[in-house]
Amino acid sequence: MKFEDFEIDETEDFAAMLEESFKKSESKSDLVTGTIVKIDEKDNLVVVDIGGGRDANLELTEITDEEGNVTFAVNDTIEVVTMGRGRISHKAALGRVALNEFIAEYDEEQEYIIEGVVTKKNKGGYVVEVDGLEFFMPRTLSYLSSKPGVEAVGKKVKAVIVKVDKEKGSVVVSRKELIERDKAKTDEIVGALLENKDPVIGTIKKITSYGMFVDVGGMDGLVHYSQISHKGPVNPSKYFAEGDEVNVVALEYDKKKRHLSLSIKDANPDPWADIDAIIGVGDTVTATISNIEPYGVFVDLGEDLEAFLHVSEISWDKNVKHPKDYLENNSEINVEVIEVDKEGRRLRVSLKNLLPKPMDAFTASNRVGDVVNGTVTSITDFGAFVKVGTVEGLLHNQEISWDKSKNAKSELKVGDEVEVKIIKIDRDAGKISLSKKALEASPVKAFAENNKNGAIVTGTVKDKKDFGVFISLEENVDALIRTEDLHPLKFDEIEKGQEITGVISFIDGNTDRIRVSVKKLERQEEREAMEQLNLDQDDSMTLGDAFGDKFNK
């Protein structure tokens, strides 16, 4: 039967349409045995005697194999189907023979589901080819779109055989029947899942970046990546593989889109519902590293719980550049729980809290006053950090040199090896203070050996502050004149570079502090003048002046 010739008004019912198809089949298509009388390779034509004094033309390609060899010769008999207007087809005859054989063996008690390709279309429906057999699928049984731009030809389809006419050699298939069955089965499965909400076992069929498709009783549902774990959104490929069985519950079903949403996390207990009984701050737990980022590490604690290990909690070393330099994915580590945020459903853990504190080891072998070697690790506006062993100490700008014009940025660079003196250890705060200038002789101490309190000194103004004036007495030896000690000088009239004379009011070579007072100098000069005046008066007195009264008595 040649289905291209099948035409029917869309208002006719299926039975009438099929009967019309048979009538046209009988009048326009016929299977006959003919004899080849001529093979014209030049015109790509084969002339076949089909009986009754009639010749018909067959295209040469129908009897040519894949290598281009002609498989028949003149006088050979050949089965063909007459197509009308002198045209015949050998391939159609082969299909017709195969179809007749299929029809002859067809068992009406058995259901046949075929899977083929739509090869032709006409007003009545479609031709579906399956292993060389052509079956007819009426448009009303096809469930194929007839919208413009939607091409049915070439589409793979599954269908069930619904009618076979052995006498007329016709097989009709229905895709609609299978789809309706699937819909009914789907509705049954979905109804059961949504009604009882009990977890069911499903099989993972496909994993994507946004979730997993899981087969539940013959129907596929989507488990979105946010519905996999109570930890939050996760990458499904890190936890599952295709073929794995998982417990799921149905969330909802979109009938229009025929989309079933499933959840794995809702099929398992929520650990956060009873988190206090599971874990608490201070607990030490074994965790598996699941993901490493520049800012920290995510670790799996089991019980469907995940915690965050910040980069600052990995090591006591403050210069951790990247967690991957210390840790590896899928490795196990012991960590201490340092925060449980119930409301935010977040856990934070620390690795360094379980490691020996570098400060403990440092203080066990070092004391204030020790001279040690270190490496400059970073430089700031206020000084440099120097690594001594496994700890870092601060070398403040004030401790770089006795020359106050020098600082860390001008004298040091990262990587420099320096010798320093430990001047302070704060074990509780984990801070160490270092000094480079302490290894050199103090110019203030040398100055203090030759100048005591009350000594008159002259210095040059270096700087003015709200609280006083700094003057330079010698190289790297400065002194402070407080505002109240400037009298009779006026603060507003003092300029940098101006020389000021005063008296040392305080000097300490150990702390490198010197204070000078102009006011005390004025008083000291007054006192010395009075003493000198008194001395002059005593020298001019006579013996009589001193003992006159006694003599008179």
Image (cartoon, helix red, strand yellow):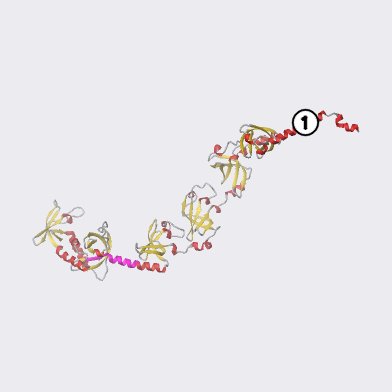
Q: Is residue 174 magenta?
A: yes
Question: How packed is label 1: few (under 14 Cα within 10 Å), some, or many (20 or more)?
Answer: few
The residue that mark 1 highlights is 533
Q: Is residue 477 something one can see in this rendering? A: no
Based on the displayed image, in which of its 4 quarters is residue 152 positioned?
bottom left
The stretch of residues the image draws in magenta is 171-186
Based on the displayed image, in which of its 4 quarters is residue 456 positioned?
top right
Residue under the image location 62 percent in, 46 percent down = 425
Q: Is residue 486 positioned above or below 243 on the image?
A: above
Instruction: Please name whichever residue, 475 or 414, is drawn nearer the observer in this view of the structure.
Output: 475
Q: Position of residue 368 (x, y in %)?
A: 63, 44
Q: Is residue 303 positioned above or below 406 on the image?
A: below
Q: Position of residue 29 (x, y in %)?
A: 15, 63
Q: Is residue 384 left or right of residue 130?
A: right
- Magenta span: predominant SS is helix
Q: Position of residue 317 (x, y in %)?
A: 54, 48
Q: Is residue 86 left or right of residue 530?
A: left
Q: Is residue 67 magenta?
A: no
- In the picture, the quarter occupied by the C terminus is top right
